[in-house]
Structure formats: C-alpha cells, structure tokens
C-alpha cells in the first residue's frame, strides 16, 4: 500500500510540476482603484486554491468545536451512567 501511495504521489507531483512549467507566463490581475498584480498563472491558481482551503477550514471550525463539545458531554454522561449502574 505504501508503494502505491508513493507512486500516486510521484505521479501527482510530476503532473503539477508540468502544469507549473507550462503555465509560467505572467498574468496580470486587476483590482479596484487601479491596483494590479503580475505573477505566473500557476502561482495565482495555487494561491487561489490555498485561499479556498483556508476559507473552508475557517467556515467549518465553529461546527467542529460545537460537535466536539457535544461529544465530550455525551462521553461524560455515558461514564457517569456506567458508574451508577456498577454500584
């Protein structure tokens, strides 16, 4: 299984590296108030991907915290009820 994982990781790395090399030409992003930024297309896409991942993690964090608190509360209830039943 490790070998398959390493082969797939290497193939993905080669595909992404090829994509980055093929899309190394500069692209200009235009913002409001005349602000612009020029960078390679592959870098801009990578930053957009990372921004999306971070935004998704930030959006899901409150739900995860709430579920973790509820899970801990339920575990305490189970532990308390099992101790009462044993007596």
Image: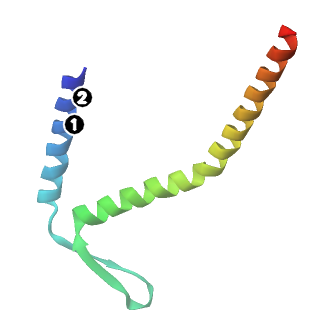
User: Is residue 3 shown above or below 16?
Assistant: above
Looking at the picture, tell me which residue is in the foreground, 71 or 82. Answer: 82
| Left or right for 45, reference 83 | left
Residue that mark 1 sits on: 9
Residue that lies at the very extreme toward the front in this rendered image: 87
Q: Position of residue 54 (x, y in %)?
A: 47, 57
Image position of 58 with respect to 6: above or below: below
Q: Quadrant of the N terminus?
A: top left
Picture coordinates of residue 19, whole percent (x, y)? 17, 53
User: For numbered disc 1, what is the local secondary structure?
Assistant: helix
Which residue is drawn at the image coordinates 15% and 69% (left, top)? 25
Residue 6 rendering spot, x and y as whole percentages = 19, 31
Q: Quadrant of residue 31?
A: bottom left
Task: Please state, as top left, top right, bottom left or bottom right, where the C terminus lies in the image.
Answer: top right
**Label 2 belongs to which residue?**
5
Q: Secondary structure at mark 2?
A: helix
For mark 2, does the 10 Å Cα neighbourhood hold few (<14), some (14 to 19), or many (20 or more) residues? Answer: few
**Residue at the image position 30 percent from the left and 61 percent from the top:** 45
Residue 84 falls left or right of residue 60: right
Q: Is residue 31 left or right of residue 86?
A: left
Residue at the spot 70% in from the left edge and 32% down from the top edge: 71
Q: In this view of the protein, which residue sits in the foreground, 74 or 19?
A: 74
Number of numbered labels in the structure image: 2
Instruction: Sort mark 1 into few (<14), some (14-19) or many (20+) by Cα contacts within 10 Å.
Output: few
Which disc, if any, is residue 17?
none
Q: Residue furthest top?
A: 86
Q: How is the image coloured?
A: rainbow
Q: Residue at x 38, y 57 (%)?
A: 50
Distance of mark 1 from mark 2, alpha carbons?
6 Å
Asked whether 74 or 55 is in front, the reply is: 74
Asked if the residue at tag 2 contacts the one at tag 1, i.e. Cβ–Cβ closer than 8 Å, the answer is: yes
């Amino acid at each position: 299984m490790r070998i398959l994982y390493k082969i797939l990781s290497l193939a993905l790395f080669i595909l992404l590296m090829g994509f980055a090399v093929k899309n190394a030409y500069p692209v200009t992003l235009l913002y409001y108030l005349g602000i612009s930024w020029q960078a390679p297309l592959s870098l801009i896409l990578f930053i957009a991907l990372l921004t999306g991942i971070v935004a998704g993690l930030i959006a899901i964090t409150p739900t995860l915290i709430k579920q973790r608190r509820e899970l801990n509360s339920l575990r305490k209830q189970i532990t308390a009820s099992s101790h009462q039943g044993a007596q």
